[in-house]
């Protein structure tokens, strides 16, 4: 995850082009092995078991390894071995920049140092980002208009679910990276109960089919009525996981059915933006 934010910084500083960044991140992704794939390859789990865990992640906000241990498919020692092997097999963006000759080692060290100062993050924060701690990214990049722990937890979970279900390279954008969606598909869903939260997402109509295809894991061509239904399912799945988390904290809520909005959201206090490799997403929150 750190690579996505470092890459955005390089882009903003005009040290590399958008095309170059896309190519570099693609090379990085090719070197990163998914934990489920690694578990199958090493004989710890079957394909059916991995698919079962992936399906369970759509119902419970927990990591792959934790669920696999609960099911008895992995032991703690096996998971540790897999995580170590996954980490050792991973090639970072910094390494690729060096190998491809974009910068010298001294230049990369200088860039990383300046990025840390610019973003206000520490070495510990960077390690957390490298380990997939999305809370660090949200806390460093989002300034909520309303101090609300529910909003913070909602955004953290939303980013986590984008990474799980749409694109592992999904990232949250800083206030300096505002995006424009000229013709967007808007989906709204209200959360009602002991806490009331209005939620909505806006996706560029040109990207909606690809994002829906990534989520559903099937090809959905535009124009297709399945696109809006699939994206409604995506928001509903996320809000369902959020509701489960609230219930675990003793806060009970219900979900209204998601629906297509006829106009851009206007009654929301928070607007948070995300970037995936297949399109940008705007998230709106209000109470």
Image (spheres, rainbow, N blue to C red):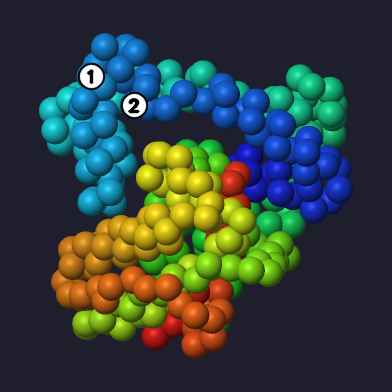
Residue with the mark numbered 2: 36
Front-lying residue, 134 or 280: 280
Quadrant of the rendered structure where residue 75 is? top left
Q: Are marks 1 and 2 in contact (CB under 8 Å)?
A: no
The kind of secondary structure element at disc 2 is helix
Coordinates of residue 207 in the picture (x, y in percent): 58, 53
The residue carrying pointer 1 sits among few (fewer than 14), some (14 to 19) or many (20 or more) residues within 10 Å by Cα, namely: some
**First reached walking from the N terminus: tag 1 or tag 2:** 2
The residue that appears at 61% across and 56% down in the rendered structure is: 206
Task: Give the distance between the C-alpha atoms of the residues marked 1 and 2, in whole angstroms.
Answer: 9 Å
Residue with the mark numbered 1: 46
Coordinates of residue 101 in the picture (x, y in percent): 84, 23
The residue that appears at 49% across and 40% down in the rendered structure is: 168
Asked whether residue 104 is in view, the answer is yes
197 to the left or right of 207: left
Front-lying residue, 66 or 188: 188
280 to the left or right of 85: right
Asked whether residue 170 is in view, the answer is no
The residue that appears at 54% across and 81% down in the rendered structure is: 263
280 versus 21 height, above or below: below
179 versus 210 height, above or below: below
The quarter in which the N terminus is drawn is: top right
The residue that appears at 21% across and 62% down in the rendered structure is: 244
């Amino acid at each position: 995850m750190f690579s996505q934010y470092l890459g955005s910084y390089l882009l903003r500083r005009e040290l590399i082009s958008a095309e170059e960044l896309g190519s570099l991140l693609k090379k990085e992704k090719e070197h990163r092995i998914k934990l489920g794939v690694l578990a199958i390859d090493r004989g710890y789990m079957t394909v059916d078991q991995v698919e079962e865990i992936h399906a369970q992640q759509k119902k419970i906000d927990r990591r792959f390894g934790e669920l696999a241990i609960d099911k008895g498919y992995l032991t703690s020692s096996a998971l540790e071995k897999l995580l170590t092997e996954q980490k050792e097999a991973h090639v970072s963006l910094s390494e690729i920049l060096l190998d491809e000759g974009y910068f010298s080692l001294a230049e990369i060290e200088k860039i990383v140092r300046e990025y840390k100062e610019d973003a206000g993050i520490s070495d510990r924060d960077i390690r957390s980002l490298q380990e997939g701690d999305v809370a660090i990214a949200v806390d460093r990049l989002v300034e909520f208009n309303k101090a609300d722990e529910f909003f913070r937890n909602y955004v953290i979970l939303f980013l986590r679910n984008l990474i799980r279900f749409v694109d592992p390279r999904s990232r949250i954008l800083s206030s300096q990276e505002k995006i424009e969606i000229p013709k967007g598909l808007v989906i709204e869903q209200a959360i009602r109960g002991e806490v009331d939260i209005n939620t909505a997402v806006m996706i560029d109509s040109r990207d909606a089919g690809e994002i829906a295809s990534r989520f559903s894991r099937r090809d959905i061509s535009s124009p297709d009525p399945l696109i809006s239904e699939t994206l409604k399912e995506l928001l509903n799945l996320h809000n369902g996981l959020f509701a489960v988390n609230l219930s675990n904290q003793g806060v009970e809520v219900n979900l209204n059915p998601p629906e297509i909005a006829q106009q851009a959201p206007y009654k929301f206090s928070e607007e948070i933006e995300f970037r995936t490799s297949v399109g940008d997403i705007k998230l709106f929150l209000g109470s």
